[in-house]
Image: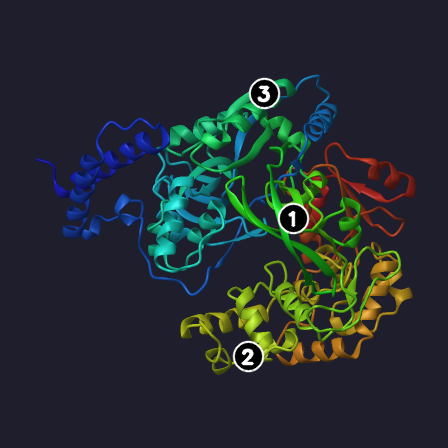
């Protein structure tokens, strides 16, 4: 007779094998009832002998307390996004460029359905699942380990004790599960999810893992980050190894030799998409050989060896019932078509942007028109054209108003711009959008500050500008509708945490025109504080590499406005970071670096961040003021320019020596 410890081990092994056959091979050999019997037996034994419970036991999927917030979890290798090919011609351009860089007539690709879910990373050490995260900004994700443990298609232990394996995959909700979840929410008078992707993301980011466990999420694994102890020469071999380890891969993946096979696969998936149990919006095409991937390398935000080849936008006909005008954070008036609801690609669409007056006139779109609508890139609803043949004479031409629909102020259209603007900085609509931008993930990342809450804060005059956020108290939030005490505390904690955001994100959050994430880093790295930046002249700014007349004028205008200076002073009083903190390691201080070609160890974004962290400057183009050009494989025209200007050219290995 087996002793209890041996029996527990045997049951765990049996359940792991049955999970593998059910979820990975899709070939179960026992009934659900028999599986449940084995699980109950294991639960009973572990309850009697808790000293033999291990973290990778199938009984330990749901556990832990609800969290107040998710902790950040950095990726050891960046989770890059993919460039899109929306037309066949764009994919052919990708293939031509790939063949040219590799010096080949034909490239071997590996194709996969492009799943419409949430990208995650699973980390295994010695074959055991130890942590997992969302993609986040590509460099740092959110630690959702407890929630990922609840997904039955994620093995808690692999069939081999691989020393280190970082698995990338897509978590999704099937169409059937999505419809069932929305029926439940409707019965409970809760807001419905717009589509399966939103439902999967919302389910996975629950602070209480019990809620995540109640929703039938699933995963398909498609790639890897850091790998130690697993040999493979191609993407196909990697996925085959995944399957042998017990990881789930999509059964529709396929190697394709050359463009003709890729295009056939694309057409096949497009024809099958409606019959699939889950949403897809295209295919992912990857260069199959690992050596070729390494040779091609990556750009700042995407690999050169892969592309998302999207399906043609799905189109439907509907009628425009109204045209409303929305006001953005910079005062831009945007006309939005309100239409008869129509389903496009499984998603109900009732609104679409009309962009500006020029677009309305060019497409001759009128109130009451029947129009052709598509989801551009299968995401953003867009009015393609009006159908003039269906007009009956009741349609009316539309012109943007001369006064702001929100505050009644006069609107202007600056010379040379397509946008019409409200020039009242106190306009409530602009304020709502400024708060939304300031609190967004790429800026101050204030979790819990949603659209309805922002509306209430502005309407009740609790927040008259973004600095007021840092003086909110629990009693202020208690007066608002539908905000529980715990939600109020969580929001105040999120606001408090945002005080420590790096200065470049503070500057980006302030929303200066033409100053995005990259230029925010350039400016704070040069000046070191917002106080010094505020005193900069237009001429001085123009001396900074990458700063042109448009940006210089925008910066000077912003800091010349008394109201903006008052907001900065209040932010400082509220404890928000106002000094750039590059770190104690300043070995690259005063040195500027430019990058060209593909690096083996870093993405472009990681390499630039490392330079800034060490006190140096990262620039995007070569000049006589550039100290170093780091040349990776397949270096471009920057290399020739650097040699002409006498800029020092170094290899990735030499760069590594400088920063380590």
Is label 1 in a helix, a strand or a loop? helix
Q: CA distance from mark 3 to mark 1?
A: 36 Å
Q: For numbered disc 2, what is the local secondary structure?
A: loop
Q: Quadrant of residue 233?
A: top right
Circle 1 residues within 10 Å: few <14, some 14–19, many ≥20: some
Question: Which residue is label 3 attached to?
Answer: 264
Residue 299 location (% of width, % of height)? 69, 40
Left or right: 405 in relation to 172: right
Q: Which x, y percent locates residue 551?
A: 83, 60
Residue at left 29%, top 49%? 60
- Judged from this view, the residue extending furthest toward the left is 1
From where the camera sits, is residue 288 visible?
no
Res 292 → quadrant:
top right
Residue 404 vs residue 596, the one in the foreground = 404
The numbered mark at residue 606 is 1
Reading the image, the residue beneath label 2 is 472
Cβ atoms at labels 2 and 3 below 8 Å apart: no
Q: Earlier in the sequence, mark 2 or mark 1?
A: 2
From the viewer's perspective, is residue 641 above or below residue 406?
A: above
Residue 152 visible in the current orientation: yes
Instruction: Compare residues 245 and 399 and report the one nearer the observer.
Output: 399
């Amino acid at each position: 007779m087996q002793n209890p410890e041996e029996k527990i081990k045997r049951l765990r092994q049996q359940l792991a094998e049955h999970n593998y056959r059910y979820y990975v091979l899709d070939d179960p050999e026992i009934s659900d009832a028999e599986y449940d019997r084995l699980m109950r037996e294991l639960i009973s034994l572990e309850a009697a002998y808790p000293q033999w419970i291990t973290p990778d036991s199938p009984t330990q999927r749901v556990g832990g307390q609800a969290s107040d917030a998710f902790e950040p979890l950095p990726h050891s290798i960046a989770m890059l996004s993919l460039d899109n090919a929306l037309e066949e011609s764009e994919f052919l351009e990708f293939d031509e460029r790939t063949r040219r860089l590799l010096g080949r007539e034909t490239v071997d690709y590996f194709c996969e359905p492009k799943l419409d879910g949430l990208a995650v990373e699973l980390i295994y050490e010695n074959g055991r699942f130890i942590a997992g995260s969302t993609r986040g900004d590509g460099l740092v994700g959110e630690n959702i380990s407890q929630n990922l443990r609840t997904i039955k298609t994620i093995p808690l232990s692999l069939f081999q004790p691989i020393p280190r394996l970082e698995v990338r995959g897509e978590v999704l909700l099937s169409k059937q599960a999505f419809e069932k979840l929305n029926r439940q929410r409707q019965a409970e008078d809760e807001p419905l999810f717009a589509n399966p992707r939103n439902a999967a993301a919302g389910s996975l980011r629950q602070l209480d893992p019990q809620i995540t466990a109640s929703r039938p999420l699933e995963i398909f694994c498609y790639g890897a980050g850091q790998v130690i102890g697993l040999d493979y020469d191609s993407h196909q071999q990697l996925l085959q190894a995944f399957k042998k380890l017990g990881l789930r891969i999509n059964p529709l993946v396929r190697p394709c030799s050359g463009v003709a096979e890729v295009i056939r696969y694309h057409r096949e998936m497009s024809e099958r998409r409606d019959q699939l149990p889950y949403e897809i919006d295209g295919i992912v095409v990857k260069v199959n050989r690992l050596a070729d991937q390494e040779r091609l390398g990556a750009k700042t935000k995407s690999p050169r060896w892969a592309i998302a080849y999207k399906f043609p936008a799905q189109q439907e006909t509907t009628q425009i019932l109204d045209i409303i005008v929305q006001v953005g954070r910079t005062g831009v008036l945007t006309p939005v078509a309100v239409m008869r609801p129509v389903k496009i690609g499984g998603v109900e669409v009732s609104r679409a942007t009309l962009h500006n007056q020029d677009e309305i006139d060019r497409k001759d779109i009128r109130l009451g028109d029947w129009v052709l609508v598509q989801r551009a890139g299968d995401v953003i609803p867009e009015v393609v054209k009006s159908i003039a043949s269906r007009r009956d004479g009741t349609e009316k031409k539309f012109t943007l108003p001369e006064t702001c629909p929100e505050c009644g102020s006069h609107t202007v259209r600056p010379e040379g711009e397509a946008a019409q603007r409200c020039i009242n900085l106190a306009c409530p609509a602009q304020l709502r959008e400024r708060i939304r931008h300031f609190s967004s993930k790429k800026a101050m990342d204030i979790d819990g500050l949603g659209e309805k809450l922002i509306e209430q804060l502005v309407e009740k005059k609790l927040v008259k500008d973004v600095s007021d956020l840092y003086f909110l108290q629990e009693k202020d939030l208690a007066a608002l509708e539908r905000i529980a005490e715990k939600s109020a505390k969580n929001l105040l904690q999120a606001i408090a945490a945002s005080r420590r955001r790096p200065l470049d994100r503070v500057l980006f959050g302030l929303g200066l025109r033409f100053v995005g994430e990259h230029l925010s880093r350039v400016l704070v790295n040069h000046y070191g504080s917002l106080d010094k930046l505020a005193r900069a002249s237009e001429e001085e700014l123009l001396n900074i590499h990458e700063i042109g007349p448009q940006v210089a004028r925008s910066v000077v205008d912003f800091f010349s406005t008394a109201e903006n200076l008052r907001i900065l002073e209040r932010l400082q009083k509220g404890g928000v970071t106002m000094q750039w903190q590059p770190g104690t390691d300043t070995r690259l201080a005063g040195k500027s670096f430019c990058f060209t070609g593909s690096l083996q160890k870093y993405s472009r974004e990681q390499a630039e961040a490392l330079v800034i962290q060490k006190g140096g400057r990262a620039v995007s183009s070569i000049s006589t003021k550039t100290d170093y050009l780091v040349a990776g494989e397949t270096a471009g025209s920057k290399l020739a320019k650097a040699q002409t200007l006498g800029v020092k050219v170094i290899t990735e290995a030499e760069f590594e020596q400088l920063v380590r």
